[in-house]
Structure formats: structure tokens, C-alpha cells
Amino acid sequence: MANLEKRTSISNTMVLIGLLVMAIMAVLPLFNFSPSQFTWMRWAFAAGAALVLIARFVGLYNGPSLRIKRLHRILISSGILYCASALMMFISQGTNDWIGFLLAGVVVQLYATMMIDHENKKSAQ
């Protein structure tokens, strides 16, 4: 049981760091940096997205609830959407197409996180 808690803790920390890096890199272009500085911002955003996706695979749920297991798989799709957003940053430079994938990932993550919390509270009762 301690191994599962440790893996979950590491996964949550990785997700937090990845999402913070992505949020910072998504906001920085609003400050009108020169185009040469966007290169390292793209790479940092991509690293954050990859970290979130890896953390989602590390923190997979292995409990008895099939609904929570499905919701954790949905969280993996949010990590995939973040990686697609990072890919769009490199493919369509100069456009804001990547924001759509980023927002889709955020919506999927919010839904799955709220439903996991709801299911955990329901099973605790």
C-alpha cells in the first residue's frame, strides 16, 4: 500500500510541475517577446506537456471501481491533448491553433478530476 501511495504522490507532483510549466509558457507570449525567444518557450511547453502525459501513465488507478479507472484513462487523453497542443506550436508557428488543443485538454482534465472527486466521496459514504 505504501508503494501505491508513493507512486500517486510522485505522479501528482509531476502533474503539478508540468501544468505549472505549461501555464507559464502559455502566458509568456502575451508579453511580446522577440520571435527568437519563442523557441525555448515552445520547448519548455512541450517538456511540461510530456511530463504531464508521463505522470498520467505513472499514476494509473488500480482499484476496484471501474468508473474511476475509466476517468483516469480519460485523464490520459488530456495529456495527449496537451502534447498535441505542443506539437501545434511547432507545426503552425505564428498562429494560435495550439490554444484549442490546450483548452480542450483543460476541459477534459477538469471534468475527469471533478468526477473522480465525486466518485471518491460517494464511495466513502
Image: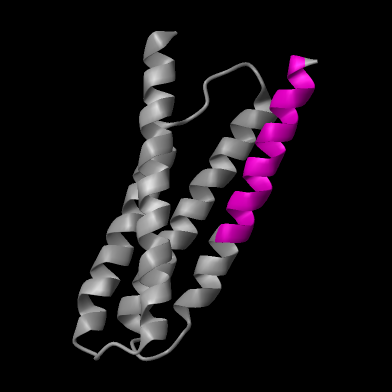
Q: Nearer the viewer, residue 41 or 94?
A: 41
What is the magenta range? 106-124
Q: Is residue 45 above or below residue 92?
A: above
Residue 110 horizontal side relative to residue 37, left or right:
right
**Residue 57 appears anywhere in the view:** no
Indicate the quadrant where residue 103 lies. Answer: bottom right
Q: Nearer the viewer, residue 58 or 25?
A: 25
**Residue 59 appears anywhere in the view:** yes
Scheme of colours in the image: one colour
Q: Quadrant of the C terminus?
A: top right
What secondary structure is the stretch in magenta mostly built from? helix
The residue that appears at 39% across and 34% down in the rendered structure is 11
Q: Quadrant of the N terminus?
A: top left
The residue that appears at 63% across and 59% down in the rendered structure is 107
Q: Is residue 35 above or below residue 41?
A: below
Indicate the quadrant where residue 64 lies. Answer: top right
* Relative image position of residue 9 (x, y in whole percent): 41, 27
Residue 125 horizontal side relative to residue 70, left or right:
right
* Relative image position of residue 68 (x, y in whole percent): 64, 30
Residue 10 horizontal side relative to residue 40, left or right:
right
